[in-house]
């Protein structure tokens, strides 16, 4: 473990990858749509953290500006997602993705 | 750039239609606006105009923008019927479609990865809403949610890829990324980043094994939204994919691992899986809309071949353009016929098409020609699109002959399911003798689309000569 974090950038890389993987796993295994939305946000937060770390590392402000773009877009996206969720809740009375299985091959 | 501004303004104008009560003329206004946008776009030809290091209007961007605007124009022509009814509010829909196509234009002209990300999001977010625009219909809801979840998941993956590439090169500018790669050795996470970008774009253009959302979303969404997703969105996705990978990663090598670029092996796997699995599953479909969705998945495999050889052969650009134009037009025509059949018979299974050849010879002929074009049978545009694509792959790398063989095998399978639809149209059935009602104007538009498909088949040079960009 001592070696792993000797370079500070590696620590950020490790943490961000871990957060990202938790987000991906959550999307794949959770059935509640709201939890899935939270996992999407977790993935984007991992990206934001890593972008900021790289931005400081390269001494280049572009990375941090990108973070603001991601935050704004994530807010817009989650708004649409919650609207879709409300629409589905009105029709099915449930927020679980198991309530949606009309379309299958 | 002017086009992007014009389309955004047009979207706002469409949004205001209900407030200022010009909904009756909105459709004409939008068509005129898109026409003007094509004109403005053509003014940028050969200008190579950079915009603040974010957009570059080179001829590649101009040509793809024109294809997207042309498809958008056709989309507005054929989709009017479904929006003049009471079911939808046409002003809102037009606004969302226009905003979404702004994203498509950004995706073909970016030179900075942040603009690429914004383009993808502007393209996708309105579509999440549009896919669910039948609020009471459960399959539309499901389609919308699936599209949203897959879309935001993909965005996360793409962003992580962008971040890793940024971490290794220190820039978001696609040309500076290429020069930062140079001949220096890159950290391992750089290659992880490229792999994540391939996966992200694989989701966006629905390549197997990242295709599983496509049939569900396409089947559940309203027909014309599906048509929009499978033509314009796909064109923009491939244009962005090609632009990024041909500019930035053409010399991303890991010499100790393999020859050639590191990502090409990934793309080859995607191509083989997409062509084989996409075509085989499409052959089993009994629902026409779902069959068209799987055909779109399978076609993505051929289009990926252009991305694969992008770094070697410059005229793959024009092959991709011809392919996109012919695929887009044929798909739009097919979805329009599907819409009318579905509207009058209430079903989009293959049986609903039975004896269409007798009751509506014109619709059947249009569908036949678009199917022939999708299957790649001469003299339609689809044949030459495939022909040019395969030859440019062989020219770039003769050792890829086996891949072209796989692609040709895939096209042979695709002939089977496209002809299944044609045969069911010309089969007769006493029960369904009612004519599918259509309007003179739409028949005229459909005939015009078919004529363009045939004309591109006779004169493919019209688009392929753009190669010398």
Image (tube, rainbow, N blue to C red):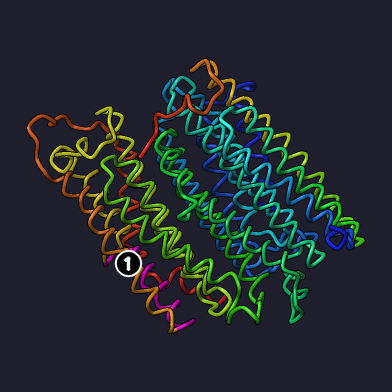
Of residue B200 and residue B30, the one placed in the foreground of this image is: B200
Q: Dot 1: within a 10 Å radius of its alpha carbon, few (fewer than 14), some, or many (20 or more) residues?
A: many
Can you give x and y, in whole percent of width and height, for residue B301 in the image?
Answer: 43, 61
Question: On the image, which quarter does residue B173 sit in?
Answer: bottom right
Rendered position, B83 above or below B191 = above
Can you give x and y, in whole percent of width and height, for residue B265 in the image?
Answer: 53, 71
Element assignment for label 1: helix
Q: In this rendering, would A67 be left or right of A24?
A: right
Of residue B40 and residue B388, the one placed in the foreground of this image is: B388
Q: As drawn, which residue projects farthest toward the left?
A: B430
Q: Magenta stretch? A: B378-397
Of residue A72 and residue B444, the one placed in the foreground of this image is: A72
Can you give x and y, in whole percent of width and height, for residue A68 in the image?
Answer: 82, 44
Question: On the image, which quarter does residue B181 sit in?
Answer: bottom right
Whether the magenta-drawn stretch holds residue B388 is answered as yes
Q: In this rendering, would B371 be left or right of B297?
A: left
Task: Decide whether the magenta segment is chiefly helix, strand or loop.
Answer: helix
Q: Which residue is mark 1?
A: B383
Q: Chain of mark 1?
A: B
Which image quadrant: the N terminus of chain B? bottom right
**Residue positioned 65% across, 81% down in the render:** B256
Which image quadrant: the C terminus of chain B? bottom right
Q: In this rendering, would B50 be left or right of B282?
A: right
Whether the magenta-drawn stretch holds residue B374 is answered as no
Can you give x and y, in whole percent of width and height, for residue B416 in the image?
Answer: 22, 56
């Amino acid at each position: 473990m001592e070696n792993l974090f000797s370079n500070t950038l590696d620590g950020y890389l490790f943490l961000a990858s871990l957060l990202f993987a938790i987000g991906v796993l959550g999307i794949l295994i959770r059935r509640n749509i709201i939890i899935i939305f939270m996992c999407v946000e977790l993935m984007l937060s991992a990206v934001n953290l890593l972008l900021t770390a790289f931005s400081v590392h390269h001494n280049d402000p572009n990375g941090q500006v990108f973070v603001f773009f991601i935050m704004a877009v994530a807010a817009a996206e989650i708004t649409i997602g919650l609207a879709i969720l409300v629409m589905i809740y009105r029709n099915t009375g449930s927020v679980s993705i198991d309530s949606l299985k009309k379309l299958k091959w | 750039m002017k086009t992007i501004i014009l389309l955004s303004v047009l979207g706002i104008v469409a949004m205001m239609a209900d407030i200022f009560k010009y909904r009756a003329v909105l459709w004409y206004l939008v068509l005129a606006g898109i026409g003007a946008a094509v004109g403005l776009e053509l003014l940028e030809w050969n200008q190579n105009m950079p915009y603040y290091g974010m957009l570059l209007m080179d001829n590649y961007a101009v040509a793809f923008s024109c294809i997207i605007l042309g498809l958008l124009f056709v989309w507005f022509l054929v989709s009017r019927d479904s929006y003049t009814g009471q079911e939808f509010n046409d002003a809102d829909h037009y606004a969302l479609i226009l905003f979404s196509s702004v994203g498509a234009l950004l995706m073909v002209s970016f030179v900075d990865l942040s603009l690429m990300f914004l383009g993808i999001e502007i393209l996708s977010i309105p579509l999440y809403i549009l896919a669910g625009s039948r609020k009471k219909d459960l399959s539309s809801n499901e389609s919308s949610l699936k599209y949203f979840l897959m879309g935001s998941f993909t965005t996360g993956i793409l962003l992580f890829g962008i971040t890793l590439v940024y971490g290794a090169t220190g820039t978001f500018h696609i040309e500076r990324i290429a020069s930062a790669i140079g001949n220096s050795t890159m950290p391992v996470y750089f290659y992880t980043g490229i792999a994540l970008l391939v996966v992200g774009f694989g989701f966006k253009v629905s390549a197997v094994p990242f295709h599983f959302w496509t049939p569900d979303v396409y089947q559940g969404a309203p027909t014309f939204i599906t048509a929009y997703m499978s033509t314009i969105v796909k064109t923009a996705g491939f244009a962005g994919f090609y632009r990024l990978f041909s500019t930035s990663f053409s010399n991303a090598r890991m010499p100790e691992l393999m020859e050639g670029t590191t990502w090409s092996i990934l793309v080859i796997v995607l191509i083989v899986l997409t062509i084989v699995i996409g075509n085989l599953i499409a052959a089993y479909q009994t629902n026409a809309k779902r069959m068209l969705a799987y055909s779109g998945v399978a076609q993505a495999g051929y289009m990926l071949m252009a991305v694969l050889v992008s770094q070697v052969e410059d005229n793959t650009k024009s092959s991709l353009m011809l392919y996109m134009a012919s695929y887009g037009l044929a798909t739009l025509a097919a979805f329009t016929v599907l819409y009318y059949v579905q509207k009058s018979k209430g079903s989009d299974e293959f049986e609903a098409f039975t004896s269409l050849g007798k009751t509506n010879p014109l619709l059947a002929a249009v569908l036949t020609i678009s199917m022939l074009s999708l299957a790649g049978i001469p003299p339609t545009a689809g044949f030459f699109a495939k022909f040019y694509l395969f030859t440019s792959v062989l020219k770039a790398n003769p050792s890829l002959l086996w891949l072209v063989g796989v692609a040709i095998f895939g096209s042979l399978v695709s002939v089977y399911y496209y002809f299944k639809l044609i045969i069911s149209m010309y089969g007769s059935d006493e029960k369904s003798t009612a004519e599918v009602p259509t309007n003179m104007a739409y028949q005229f538009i459909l005939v015009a689309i078919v004529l363009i498909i045939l004309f591109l088949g006779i004169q493919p040079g019209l688009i392929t000569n753009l190669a010398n960009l």
